[in-house]
Structure formats: structure tokens, C-alpha cells
Amino acid sequence: MAFAEISGDRGVHHMLPDSKGRVMVQGLLTATLPTKLGGDMNYIAKTMRFEFLRPVFVGDTVTCVGTVKKVKERQERFEVGISIVCMNQEGKEVLRGGTQGIIRR
């Protein structure tokens, strides 16, 4: 509910339980998880692309894997391309995407 307050996304599916008693997490909350990977590398994103494949519910465990697909060395930085996959506790993909950005030297 805290993300709903910050984002303003108070869609009923994010506020009230469904018929199975689950509350769906905002997609952009799930999309913030890969930013931890970028933070660990001092990565500055220029673009981000996400495809939301399945809902994530309060209490789910989500694991994100980033794979560096491209590195181009420049004088003061590295240009980097990363693919991202996030999976729930059942091993099902919930988010897929990619990002392009830089890492300064």
C-alpha cells in the first residue's frame, strides 16, 4: 500500500484482494527490482524497456537476473546493454526487458 501512496496508482486491483485473497503489486514496483543490479555496477540507464508477463502479488518472492549483452569501451565510459528477466517463486517469468546505458570510468 505504501507504493500506492507514493505512485498514486490506487487501481482497485492494487488495493482490494481478488477472489483468491491476493492483492496485485503495481508493475512499476516490480520493475524497480532490476535497478538494484544497476546500482551495484554504478550503471546509469539511458533507456529501459519492460514487458509485464504475469501479475505479482503481495507476498510473492521475485528474483531478477541481468545479463550483460553488450559492452563498448569509450574514452571515459563503457556503453552497456543488459537483458533482464524477473521470475516469481514458482520459476515463472513475470517481467522481461532490457536497458541501455553507461558506466563511467
Image (spheres, rainbow, N blue to C red):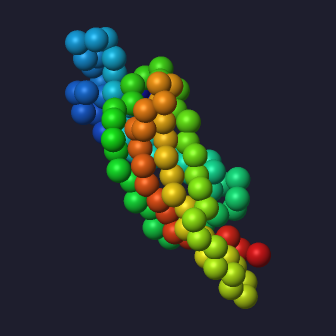
Q: In the displayed structure, would residue 35 be above or below residue 58?
A: below
The location of residue 94, given as percent across then percent down, is 40, 38
Q: Seen from this angle, which residue lies furthest right?
A: 105
Residue at 49% x, 41% y is 86
Residue at 28% x, 33% y is 10
User: Is 82 on the left or on the right of 30, as rendered?
Assistant: right
The answer to which of 75 and 87 lies nearer the viewer is: 87
Quick check: can you spot residue 60? yes
Q: Seen from this angle, which residue lies furthest bottom?
A: 75
User: Is 89 on the left or on the right of 23, as rendered?
Assistant: right
- Quarter holding the C terminus? bottom right
The location of residue 43, given as percent across then percent down, is 64, 63
Residue at 61% x, 61% y is 68
The location of residue 30, given as percent across then percent down, is 45, 40
Residue at 23% x, 27% y is 12
Q: In the displayed structure, would residue 66 be above or below residue 55?
A: below
**Residue 71 occupies quadrant:** bottom right
**Residue 3 occupies quadrant:** top left
